[in-house]
Amino acid sequence: MDRTLTILGIETSCDDTAAAVVRAPEGGRPEILSSDVLGQTSLHEAFGGVVPEIAARAHAERLDGVVEAALGASGVGLNEIDAIAVTAGPGLIGGVLSGVMLARGLAAARGLTLVAVNHLAGHALTPRLTDGVAFPYLMLLVSGGHCQFLLVKGADSFQRLGGTIDDAPGEAFDKTAKLLGLPQPGGPSVEAEAALGDPLRFRFPRPLLDREGCDMSFSGLKTALLRARDELVAKQGGITVQDRRDLCAGFQSAVAEVLAKKTSRAIDMADERPTVLAVAGGVAANKAIRAMLETVSAQAGLPFIAPPLRLCTDNAAMIAWAGIERMRAVLTSDPDFVARPRWPLDQTAPALLGSGKKGAKA
Ligand code: KG4
Ligand code: ZN
């Protein structure tokens, strides 16, 4: 019997409408046959954050087209698809519902298996899609809406070792950019300015470094940055180009140092020796942060895995792959599953505080 699985993945939990087809021979290398992502940055730009209603409507309008495009590009017809994997949470509920309804309709019409996937599991399992990493491994998921350390032990076994108690780092980068008049998304623009600045001129706080464990906090950083900016304005009547670069450099080095130190602590906290340290999420694109994490990894004697950026940020190939992992592990979905705004991967860990501008933190 051919144990190859070909799965259509659908992702609509935040501001990217995405569909992908992934094929995986049993025991062989999985192949991404297509992966389409239609972003919504321009729709939300004027509002300084993702507007849930606008996101939900855009998903509903665009998802059909994105699914058709992904199927077309894959060269695979719906009749060759074994199952549909869809993000069922956590995320902005209107968007998640759009994806779940389309997937449910398509699965019912074609008599296909439907697999409900946790969006965070999609990110967390990506190193197995790209690099065939073995369990257990340590994952730092760091994006605009999420920041947590996970010990990934199996397709449905995740231990959360810690995470942010307030803002996600990407959110902090975005707010910093806003405070300094730089374009959104803030990460790349703050990074570009920071590269020309002096990271030692402004010494921003490193919150929770003296606290045990690997929980983090980033919301105080923007207050410190705001204060530093306002002091300059009061003294000089404005900020110079070099002030802005130095503020960005100081901010970025604070984030990088916190992430590096807490990563090192997470490695020590894991109750099993991880095979690798892996990162995912938009903030993993930051070169200074990546370099710090590579150093921490090398010091701990662990290989460092950073999947290509298009698979680190939101996409549907990771959802299709998580569906394949669930099917291989014979983890069935309740056919009556519901879309969930909050859905922590590790049900035993205490809930994190707050909710990011890009959706529920889990
Ligand atoms: O994973 P992602 O694409 O989307 C979600 O959060 O769902 O992450 C986007 C976040 C944004 O906040 C963006 O500012 C941040 O990742 N980001 C960066 C960089 N590139 C993107 N942060 C720091 N440095 C970067 N180079
Ligand atoms: Zn995500």
Image (tube, rainbow, N blue to C red):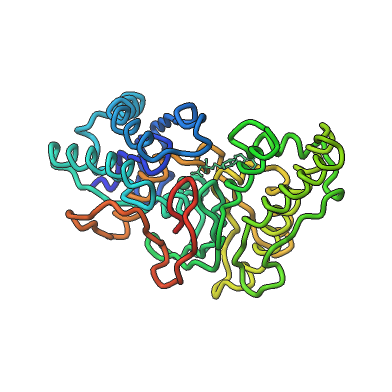
> 113 left or right of 61?
left
Residue 340 at what x, y percent from top left? 31, 54
> 272 left or right of 31?
right
Name the residue nearer the viewer: 282 or 237.
237
> 142 left or right of 37?
right
Residue 294 at what x, y percent from top left? 70, 53
Q: Image quadrant for the C terminus? A: bottom left
Number of numbered discs visible in the structure rendering: 0
Q: Is residue 73 above or below residue 284?
A: above
Residue 41 seen in the figure: yes
Which residue sits at x=51%, y=53%?
146
Residue 118 at what x, y percent from top left? 36, 53
Name the residue nearer the viewer: 20 or 99.
99
Which residue sits at x=86%, y=42%?
235
Which quadrant would residue 30 be assigned to in this image? top left
Which quadrant would residue 77 be assigned to in this image? top left
Residue 287 at what x, y percent from top left? 70, 42
Residue 294 seen in the figure: no
Which residue sits at x=66%, y=38%?
177
> 217 left or right of 35?
right
Q: Is residue 274 above or below residue 12?
A: below
Query: Which quarter of the frame holds ligand 1?
Result: top right
Which residue sits at x=74%, y=56%?
295
